[in-house]
Structure formats: C-alpha cells, structure tokens
Image (tube, helix red, strand yellow):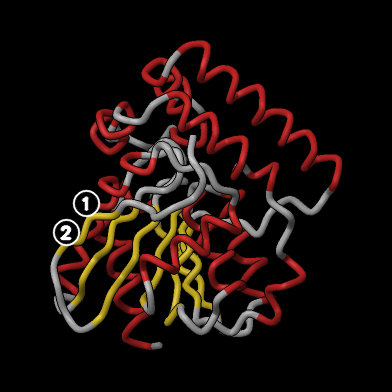
Amino acid sequence: MSAPNSLSLVSVGGGSRTMVLVHGFTQTGASWLPLVEELRLLIPDTRFLLVDLPGHGASTDISADLRTTADLLVSVGGPAIYVGYSLGARVVLHAALQQPNVLESCVLISGTPGITDDKERAQRRASDELLADRILTIGTRDFIDEWLRQPLFATLSPSQARRDERYANNAEGLADSLRTSGTGTQSPLWDLLKDCYVPMLLVAGSLDTKFRDIASQMGDVLPDARTAIIDHAGHSAHLERPAAVAQAIANFLEDS
C-alpha cells in the first residue's frame, strides 16, 4: 500500500454542474452506473464523477483513513454535489464537516455518523480486524460471496449485487480499507452535526430498519436535512431501486 496521492475516477456525461459519487465497501465507482443511467434522464445537464475509494478499484494501492480520504475526495471532486453510499456516505459526511464550503449539497445513502458507545465501537474495530484477516486468508472472491450472504444484503438480487465488479478488487486493498476506514475506526460525529449547514438528503431503504432509524435521528439534528425512505428496498437502495433513488435525488436538488 502507498501513501495517499490522488483517487482514481471516471467521468460520465457533461454539463453545468458536477455530481461526485462515492461507493460502498467491496464496490468500485462502476457500481453507480445503474443510478447514473436514471439520473441522466432526470438531471441531464450534469457531469458524473465515479470515484474509486482507497483500497478499491484503480485506487487499490492507496491507504488512507476516513479524514484523509475525505480530503482526497474533495481535491478530485471540487465544488459539486456529493453522493455516498455506506462507506462512501461516511466519507462524504466527513467531507461535509471538514470542507463545507466546497460541497454544494450531499446525499447520504445508508450512512452513519458512527458508533457512540466506546465499548461497542471497540468491539466493532476488533471485528473489522478479524474480517480483514479473513479476506487475506480466503481471497477476494470467496470473501465477496460471504459478504453478500449477510442479512444486510438479503434484498439484493444476484444481478443487482454486481459481483463481477466487486471481484475485481484485491484482498490486500479490501483488508486495508477495513483497518483504516471501517466503522470501528470512526470517531463518532453526532455532536458535530448541529453545526453542519451543507444541504443534505438522507436516504434509507424501508426494509433497512437500522439505517432508516439512523437517518431519522440525523435528520432531527442537522440544520438543513431531508429524509427519503425508499419503499421495498434494503441497505443498497440505489442498486435495488435506482429509479426511485434517482427521483428522490432529483426532487431534493430541485427544492434545494
């Protein structure tokens, strides 16, 4: 693994505004293509930047924690609308807190400000360390298959899971991502939310009760936030119901 340099990205389309999309753990920037296809119909005058996070895709050799990753993200994305899912949502939230003047607005899909309980957070960190060892032991392909068998992803169909894109990652990169940017490593950000004035859309699937509740709790604290609950979707709402998520984002941008 190397020191942070510049995150890899792919640009899709063009227009007067820019949207930066930040994927979840085990994914790559290409995981956003189903959503981008829908977004291009609703907000056509937009350039979409699909970023590969450290340890993933073409950024697999980069190692960085969440705070550093957020700065790297803003350095390649610039002034833009930022959309993040899961791990990507946690990165985008850090960016909103660290560089609020650069983010025009942001969308967090299945995101969290972190675990507040010290003991629970330490347990999660230990669990992530074991999981990182597991990736290195069994390899990327078997780990991805195990990862997607979690109840969290039970509502994803085989085609929606986009396994081939996930298989393209390597074990070393994924293990490092868990160790540097896993939820257990994240300092809780809840106390900072009240001072975050970046317009924010909080998205969760109706079937993902944990993150639906987190979105509701965040919405109660953030000064400028809206919540969109996507019916008949779980943790990966943007993969399960891309048209519905795209419509929620388009409505948010129109009203912002």
* Snapshot quadrant of residue 14: bottom left
Judge whether residue 212 can be spotted in this image: no
Q: Secondary structure at mark 2?
A: helix
Q: Is residue 45 above or below residue 64?
A: below
Residue depicted at 28% across the width and 75% down the height: 18
Q: Seen from this angle, which residue lies furthest right?
A: 119
- Which numbered dot is residue 22? none
18 relative position to 209: left or right = left
Three-letter code for the amino acid on which mark 1 is drawn: Pro
Task: Locate residue 194, reporting x and y percent.
Answer: 70, 79
Tell me if mark 2 has few (under 14), some (14-19) or many (20+) residues whose alpha carbon lies within 10 angstroms of its own.
some
Q: Is residue 137 above or below residue 215?
A: above
Tag 1 and tag 2, C-beta contact below 8 Å: yes
Judge whether residue 185 can be spotted in this image: yes
Q: CA distance from mark 1 to mark 2?
A: 5 Å
The residue where tag 2 is placed is 37
Q: Secondary structure at mark 1?
A: helix
The residue where tag 1 is placed is 34
* Snapshot quadrant of residue 158: top left
Residue depicted at 61% across the width and 66% down the height: 216
In-front residue for pair 120/54: 54
Which quadrant would the C terminus be assigned to in this image? bottom left
144 relative position to 247: left or right = right
Three-letter code for the amino acid on which mark 2 is drawn: Glu
In-front residue for pair 65/80: 65
